C-alpha cells in the first residue's frame, strides 16, 4: 500500500527515506535512518522492528544484504513485509515478501532503491527511479521529493495517496529534514509546500543547534 525510496547521497554522505501511501501517517513508523550508518524503509504490513533492528545490524558492521538476511531470522511473517536497506557504503538490498499486496517489487540503483506494493504497476517504480536519477545535481531532500511526485503522477498507490514523508539525516544524530504530511487530499503538493516552509524557517534553526563537535551551537558565536 506504499511506495518509497531510500538513498545515500554520494556528494554529502546524507541518508534519506521518502514515502507516500493511501494510509494516514506514513512517516511515523516507515522511516529509519542514522547519520554515517544507513537507512531503512519498512512497509506492506509494517514491522517497525525491522527498521530498529536493521539500524543496529548496520552499526554492528553488516552490509545491506546481510542486514536483510538477519532480519528474516527475527520476523516469522516476512512474507507479509517489504523492507529496503542502504548501508554506509551505499550498497542497497530489498526484500519483498510473496504475500505483499500486488503489484509489488523493487528497483535497485546506484546508492538508492525504490520499492512498493499495491501499486498501479511497475511503471510507478520506474518513474520514481528515473526522476531521482534525473535530479542528480539537486540536494538529496529535493531529489527524494521529486521522485515521490513522479511516482504519484505515474499511478502511485492503487487506492490513491493520503500521506507522504521525507526524512534526511546529515552528520548529527537528529534529522536535518523531517517533514510529514499525515493526512491530506493532495499529500505530495503539501509535501512540496512544507519543504519550502522548512527551508525558510526550520532548517536554519537546525543548522544553528548544538552538535557533538560544538555543544554550544551557534550560541557560542554570539557576543556576551
Image: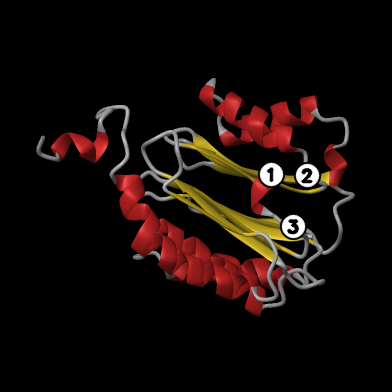
Residue indicated by mark 2:
46
Q: Mark 2 or 3, which is nearer the eye?
A: 2
Label 1 neighbour load within 10 Å: few <14, some 14-19, many 20+: some
- Whether 65 is drawn above or below 185: the answer is above
Q: Are marks 1 and 2 in contact (CB under 8 Å)?
A: yes
Q: Earlier in the sequence, mark 1 or mark 2?
A: 1
Expressed as whole percent of the image width and height from the top left, the position of residue 56 reads 59, 25
Residue indicated by mark 1:
29
Q: Nearer the viewer, residue 114 or 4?
A: 4
Expressed as whole percent of the image width and height from the top left, the position of residue 124 reads 68, 71
Residue indicated by mark 3:
105
Quarter of the figure with residue 39: top right
Q: CA distance from mark 3 to mark 1?
A: 20 Å
Judged from this view, the residue extending furthest toward the left is: 223
- Whether 67 is drawn above or below 94: the answer is above
Expressed as whole percent of the image width and height from the top left, the position of residue 61 reads 52, 23
Amino acid at each position: 500500500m506504499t511506495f518509497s525510496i531510500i538513498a545515500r547521497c554520494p556528494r554529502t554522505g546524507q541518508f534519506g527515506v521518502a514515502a507516500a501511501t493511501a494510509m494516514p501517517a506514513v512517516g511515523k513508523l516507515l522511516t529509519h535512518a542514522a547519520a554515517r550508518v544507513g537507512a531503512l524503509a519498512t512497509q506492506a504490513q509494517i514491522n517497525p522492528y525491522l527498521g530498529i533492528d536493521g539500524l543496529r545490524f548496520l552499526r554492528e558492521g553488516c552490509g545491506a544484504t546481510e542486514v536483510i538476511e538477519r532480519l528474516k531470522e527475527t520476523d516469522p511473517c516476512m512474507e507479509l513485509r517489504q523492507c529496503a536497506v542502504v548501508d554506509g557504503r551505499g550498497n542497497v538490498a530489498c526484500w519483498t515478501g510473496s504475500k505483499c499486496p500486488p503489484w509489488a517489487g523493487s528497483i535497485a540503483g546506484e546508492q538508492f532503491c525504490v520499492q512498493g506494493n499495491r501499486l498501479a504497476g511497475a511503471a510507478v517504480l520506474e518513474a520514481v527511479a528515473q526522476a531521482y536519477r534525473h535530479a542528480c545535481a539537486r540536494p538529496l531532500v529535493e531529489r527524494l521529493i521529486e521522485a515521490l511526485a513522479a511516482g504519484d503522477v505515474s499511478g502511485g498507490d492503487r487506492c490513491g495517496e493520503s500521506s507522504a514523508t521525507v526524512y534526511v539525516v546529515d552528520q548529527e544524530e537528529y534529522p536535518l529534514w523531517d517533514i510529514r504530511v499525515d493526512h491530506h487530499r493532495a499529500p505530495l503538493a503539501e509535501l512540496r509546500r512544507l519543504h519550502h516552509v522548512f527551508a525558510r524557517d526550520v532548517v536554519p534553526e537546525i543548522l544553528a543547534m548544538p552538535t557533538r563537535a560544538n555543544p554550544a551551537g551557534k550560541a557560542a558565536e554570539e557576543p556576551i
